[in-house]
Amino acid sequence: MIEKVIIMGAAGRDFHNFNVYFRNNPRYRVMGFTAAQIPDIEGRLYPPELCGKNYPEGIPIYAEEQLPGLIRDFQIDMAAFSYSDILHTDVMHKASIVMAGGADFILLGATYTMLRSIKPVVAVCAVRTGCGKSQTTRKICSIMKAWGKKVVAIRHPMPYGDLRDQIVQRFSSYEDFEKHKCTIEEREEYEPLVDQGIVVYAGIDYEKILRSAEKEADVIVWDGGNNDTPFYHPDVHIVIFDPHRPGHELLYYPGETNMIMADIAVINKVDSAEPSNVDIVRQNIKTHAPDADIVLAKSDVIVENSDKIKGKRVLIVEDGPTLTHGNMAYGAGTIAAKLYCAGEIVEPVKYAVGTIKKTYEKYPGVKSVLPAMGYSKTQVKDLEQTINNADCDLVLFATPIDLPKLLNIAKPTIRVKYEYKDHSKPSLETVLLKHMEKL
């Protein structure tokens, strides 16, 4: 008997799980995907070009809110949970809804969906969104380049547009960002690596992506998203921890899985976190991943013309996903504002319009900073208008890219950058070399 399946996702892990497990599996019939976390990604079709011979008409994508009705109407046998950075308790709340509807609820094993590469793979993952994966990935790429290795980065998927055009994407220039119609979130992840001279791959079909990347790489760096587990079997698994959220490494799915699997555990932001919180995280690593090497790191805040911040009323724009499903109330911009003695941090909520206003309604914990949301042209315009509406002297942009180049801002701006830096010995390079020498 064929089992009817719904895959619960957020335009990433869900598509990968379908491709590697469900697509050609005669035991199952996938009736649809549901979409959460990312705005306006439902209502699309997972196209026939990606579905294989068993789904000639493609597979519809619904909003997760429709899940109970879908289970009832399609007489679903099983829901496969396939997205990341969600409290363990919330996972089980969703499981309860599924089971109450009469369906089974499953989580696919982390290693079960990992593809094998013919090249060494270094995976950079985390226990939460916003721990500092991106700067760590950039640091690792720099280390590998200094060792004479040709590095190719493969980024966790962010396919929010026309899925037929996003099967395999390669980025090596700014023209590629325009060619692939990248959102702000995509550019934030790809652009800093391209600036380093690193080729970046992303897309939907990660088997095809891997085989393309292998042709031009000595080493592949998996650049993870949220706190998801790697799509590729890692030869070295690096996991980033955030002592500003101590204990979260035990509370979120699948971040705890990453912790348990870690070869190298990087405790980031130790320069700005309470020492007692660093100790909590360190002890949790020692308890649950006792074989992992621990590296202490900091996110160095870099600000040009920092003297212009003193005494000013500042509006702070921070990385969007870190604030929303990452549940962080602040980031590098707030740290810079306090470090350089801003006169006031202007709350942006009352100036928000359109989709940005809806973001604040959905994530009420985000109040004092503005998340750089830009999943669509409409949202980019709403972000731009919200910034221009704000009564402030200065805007601090603390996102991975130079956002003012993409927006029309009628106010003075300063960019806040942040980069990986070792806090103490052993260094990341020393520990990474130890693991690479075993390969």
Image (spheres, rainbow, N blue to C red):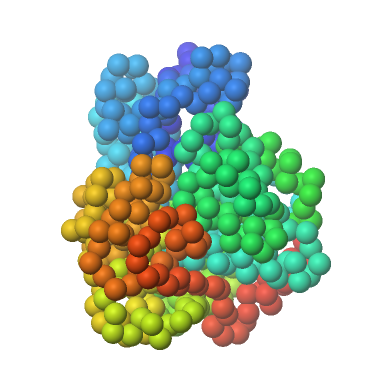
- Which quadrant holds residue 55? top right
Q: Is residue 112 above or below residue 228?
A: above
The residue under the point 34% across, 78% down is 337
The residue under the point 78% across, 59% down is 150
The residue under the point 41% across, 42% down is 376
Residue 141 picture location, percent across and down? 67, 64
Q: Residue furthest front?
A: 410
Task: Give the side of residue 436 with respect to residue 423, left or right.
Answer: right
- Which quadrant holds residue 112? top right
Residue 248 visible at all: no
Residue sitting nearer the eye, 118 or 280 = 118
Total number of numbered labels?
A: 0
Residue 6 picture location, percent across and down? 41, 27
Q: Is residue 275 above or below residue 379?
A: below
Residue 132 picture location, percent across and down? 49, 66
Task: Give the side of residue 235 with respect to residue 358, left or right.
Answer: right
Residue 166 picture location, percent across and down? 58, 35
Considering the image in quadrants, where does the C terminus appear?
A: bottom right
Q: Residue furthest left?
A: 350
The residue under the point 42% across, 37% down is 9
Residue 301 visible at all: yes
Residue sitting nearer the eye, 438 or 35 = 35
Residue sitting nearer the eye, 257 or 334 = 334
